[in-house]
Image (cartoon, rainbow, N blue to C red):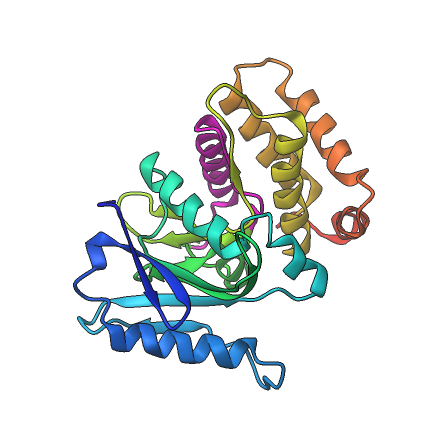
Amino acid sequence: MHGILKKQIKGFLFRINKSYETVVEESFLNTLIEDACRYSSKKRKGSLPKGNRTLPNGTSVYVKFWRPRRAMHRVKTIWHPTRIEVEGRQYLQFTKNKLPVPDIVLWGSKRISLFKFGIFKVGMVVSRQIKGGENLKILSRQKIQPWTVRNHSQKFEVLERIAQLLHFIHEKNLVHGDYMLKNIVFTPEKPNGRYWIIDLGSGWSLPSNKSLSNSDRNRELCRMVYSLARNGFSRKDALYFLKSYICYVKDNNQSHNLAKKYLDICLSQKDHRALQATHLFASNRSS
């Protein structure tokens, strides 16, 4: 990361990665603004204008827009950073800590002036597309690499890798906030492939003088447990993921018992996803 350049156009404040400063032309920014304004309009119809695009130099990027869904969300943005702003800052933190995230090209937002900060209206994040990558949720349904190699299941190896990846995040005093299969992208690089982290808008960074709390850790682990349940994995698979994470955090002979304890915590949460996961684990068969 070579630093961030601020640029204001038509009421939008953009923060542009200086590595891409020469290729992010004003015409590209104007196109983003037009799409963002259409998306934020009350008369908006159709689907959100997100997806793959190409920079003027041919670089493939992924564009994501966001706006507050409810009036309360708009009010909160007077005092709190928006999801777009959080995602931009988190990308910088993850990159600084050498965690596997795609390059962020830019993020920007528009606010309606009010007092010191103003009410957030709409924003966007543009990140570099991960070439040849697909998220683990889709790959698990297709039963292809990395989950299956030469007709042999490799799911425990994958579960161990994503547990290790979560440990690396927490080790840097970072919280992803939405750690699940769809937010991990796999690319088939030799020798064992590479795993990328995406969608950082729900996370946060902890001060260096603070350690990860139990509630922060439980939230991260529960999100992945629920994701495994929804995607056809068994209770045994979820236990293996939890046990792998615990072994990376500390060498503990009681890792199996601790994994069971964490799973019980996840499935006892007062959350509809916990109830859904309980029922799904009862029906899912270990493949």
Percent coordinates x, y for residue 287 in the rendering: 61, 50
Looking at the rendering, in which quadrant would you find the N terminus?
Answer: top left
For the point 39% across and 59% down, the residue is 107
Q: For the magenta stretch, what is the residue range?
A: 151-180
Q: Residue 224 occupies which quadrant of the picture?
A: top right
Name the one closer to the observer, 69 or 168.
69
Percent coordinates x, y for residue 100 in the rendering: 35, 43
Q: Is residue 58 magenta?
A: no
Percent coordinates x, y for residue 90 in the rendering: 44, 44
- Report how many numbered discs are placed on residues in the image: 0
For the point 66% across and 33% down, the residue is 218
Residue 174 in view here: yes
Q: Is residue 172 magenta?
A: yes
Residue 215, compared with residue 16, is above or below; it is: above
Name the one closer to the observer, 4 or 90.
4
Horizontal arrangement in the rendering, residue 145 relative to residue 190 (left or right) = right
Residue 38, compared with residue 193, is above or below; it is: below
Name the one closer to the observer, 220 or 286.
220
Horizontal arrangement in the rendering, residue 239 relative to residue 180 (left or right) = right
Percent coordinates x, y for residue 128 in the rendering: 31, 60
Residue 70, compared with residue 38, is above or below; it is: above
Residue 126 in view here: no
